[in-house]
Amino acid sequence: MPGLNLILLGPPGAGKGTQAQLLRADFSLAHISTGDMLRAAVAEGSELGRQAQGHMERGELVPDELIVAMIRERIGAEDARAGFLLDGFPRTIAQAEALGRALGAGGRELSAVVALELSDDVVVQRLAGRRVCVKNPAHIYHIDFDPPKHEGVCDQDGARLIQREDDREETIRRRLAVYHEQTEPLIAYYDQRSLLHRFDAARDREHLHEIIRAELAALRFAEGL
């Protein structure tokens, strides 16, 4: 029996990574991240990986046709036949249309698009407040929500805490501008196709997960998936 085929959308800082891991476990989905997929293809030395590597080494964006070909290959893999969760793809209307054609050619279709919605100001607060240990980047704090006991010092190893370049407000604002220009139009695109499910990502992550899981479980039951 086919499973859920999902897309996860949302601005940076909306918690897509956290929710993706939880939903993957809830519904036994293949979690397909374009970044992970590109790195794996390059490491494996596949033909698509070699083509993508050339663009990446030249500092170019990987063309849509290559990304779509990789996605088509990945969703056809054995672990994705029972359902998948796309994270980081599509990013544009053109990619969404190409994905629709690829799925249709394989006799498959999307089940739902999960849209995590969060205001720009909250995104900036979440990301700009992060501080990372210079000794172990896995030790992460937040100046408002999870501060260290001593300002600027890691609780676990006493090393200095820094703000990464990606977490500076001006960098976050640029990333948000790209999201609004290129990816946010997908909200209306999938809403018009009755696939969109909106969720307030400002909620507590556990509560948010419960709401998303319940709505997708109801969808799966209604469609007999």
Image (cartoon, helix red, strand yellow):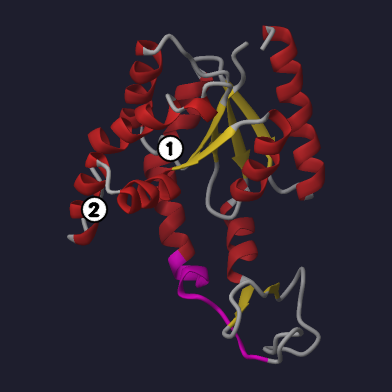
Residue 82's spot in the image, x, y percent?
A: 58, 21
- Quadrant in which the N terminus appears: top right
Quadrant of res 154: bottom right
Q: Which label is found at residue 166? A: none
Q: Is residue 80 left or right of residue 185?
A: right
| Residue range highlighted in magenta | 159-171
At a point 31% along the width and 51% down the height, the residue shown is: 42
Pair 2/1: label in front: 2
At a point 24% along the width and 33% down the height, the residue shown is: 65
Give the residue at mark 1.
89
Check the image and report above or below for 87 versus 155. Answer: above
Check the image and report above or below for 36 versus 124. Answer: above
Residue 105's spot in the image, x, y percent?
A: 35, 12
Q: Is residue 96 left or right of residue 154?
A: left
Check the image and report above or below for 150 versus 203. Answer: below
Q: Which label is found at residue 53? A: 2
- Quadrant in which the C terminus appears: top right
Amino acid residing under circle 1: Phe
For disc 1, the neighbor class at 10 Å (few under 14, some 14 to 19, many from 20) is: many
At a point 61% along the width and 79% down the height, the residue shown is: 136
Amino acid residing under circle 2: Gln
Q: CA distance from mark 2 to mark 1?
A: 18 Å
Q: Is residue 217 left or right of residue 105?
A: right
Q: Circle 1 — which element?
A: loop
Residue 165's spot in the image, x, y percent?
A: 46, 74
Give 181 or 23, whichever is nearer the viewer.
Answer: 23
Mark 2 and mark 1 lie on one chain; the one further toward the N terminus is 2
